[in-house]
């Protein structure tokens, strides 16, 4: 599992999703109640599979000599809040971060989006100052779970979020699936930006029937939403 998580982390620079030591990938073993995550602040070209850190769902490091990623509390919170997910990715990929910092949902304008995200990708607002809990590092996870609950979104149907003042988090059935979703998010964010520049006054939103048709053609009639057509 450490090798698999290491391999998934090494896809972040390969897919041009990170700069320096930014970003992190993890994967969970639900039977053991443990997840493996990248260590904090280690250059990707220095990273080794044995550097991966093993953490339990209370945030305790159970194996590893290095500090786990600074985003470990968010990964942990998401594994607890979204029981169907198996892997989590965080990046600072520039186009997705641009939408996150602008506080804008990433709209479904086309089938490139619909293949992976069954609907607009939500921008989750940061907690207000008075909401910030003493466990500051948990706030991002709280914000994400709250946004999905508020919108009634199935996290496996829209496996991504844009956290304002921070950046994108994606997830999937495992670490590699979550990395795939992170790359699609970045590609679609750049496409959306240019579409909005090219035609700023039109309604470019993909109609629901096309979203349905395309998503279920790709994922099957019993996809996450359990509906089909
Ligand atoms: O946003 C931040 C830091 O502000 C983090 O997401 C870093 O981008 C990755 O940190 P480590 O995983 O190396 O701790």
Image (cartoon, helix red, strand yellow):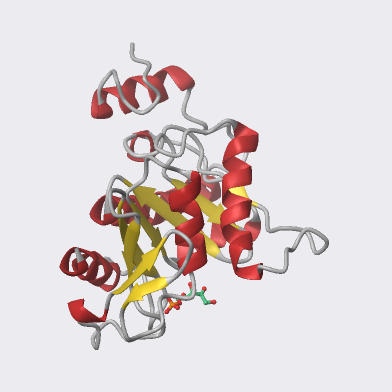
- Would residue 162 be found to the left or right of residue 61 on screen? right
Of 118 and 128, the residue lying toward us: 128
Quadrant position of residue 163: bottom right
Outermost residue on the left side: it is 3
Outermost residue on the right side: it is 130
Percent x, y of residue 71: 48, 69
Percent x, y of residue 93: 43, 66
Q: Residue at x 26, y 65 (%)?
A: 15
- Would residue 117 be found to the left or right of residue 175 on screen? right
Quadrant position of residue 150: top right
Q: Residue at x 66, y 69 (%)?
A: 136
Percent x, y of residue 16: 31, 69
Of 137 and 225, the residue lying toward us: 137
Look at the picture and state if 203 lies above or below 137.
above
Of 175 and 67, the residue lying toward us: 67
Look at the picture and state if 129 lies above or below 114.
below
Quadrant position of residue 173: top left
Assign the N terminus to one quadrant of the image.
bottom left
- Would residue 160 be found to the left or right of residue 64 on screen? right
- Would residue 78 be found to the left or right of residue 127 on screen? left
Assign the C terminus to one quadrant of the image.
top left
Residue 216, can we see it? yes
Residue 193, can we see it? no
Percent x, y of residue 63: 30, 76
Q: Residue at x 48, y 23 (%)?
A: 207
Look at the picture and state if 201 lies above or below 174.
above
């Amino acid at each position: 599992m450490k090798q698999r998580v290491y391999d998934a982390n090494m896809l972040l620079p390969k897919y041009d999703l990170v700069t320096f030591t930014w970003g992190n990938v993890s994967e969970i073993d639900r039977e053991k109640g443990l997840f493996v995550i990248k260590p904090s602040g280690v250059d990707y070209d220095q990273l080794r599979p044995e550097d991966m850190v093993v953490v339990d769902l209370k945030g305790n490091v159970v194996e590893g000599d290095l500090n786990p990623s600074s985003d470990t509390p968010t990964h942990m919170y998401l594994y607890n809040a979204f029981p169907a997910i198996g892997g989590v990715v965080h990046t600072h990929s520039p186009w997705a971060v641009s939408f996150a910092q602008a506080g804008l949902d990433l709209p479904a304008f086309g089938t490139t989006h619909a293949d992976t995200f069954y609907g607009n990708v939500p921008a989750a607002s940061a907690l207000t100052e008075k909401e910030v809990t003493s466990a500051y590092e948990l706030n991002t996870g709280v914000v994400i779970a709250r946004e999905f609950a508020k919108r009634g979104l199935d996290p496996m149907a829209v496996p991504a979020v844009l956290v304002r003042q921070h950046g994108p988090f994606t997830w999937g059935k495992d670490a590699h699936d979550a990395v795939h979703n992170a790359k699609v998010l970045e590609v679609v964010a750049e496409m959306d930006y240019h579409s909005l520049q090219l035609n700023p006054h039109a309604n470019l939103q993909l109609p629901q029937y096309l979203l349905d048709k395309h998503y279920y053609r790709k994922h099957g009639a019993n996809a996450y939403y359990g509906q089909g057509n």
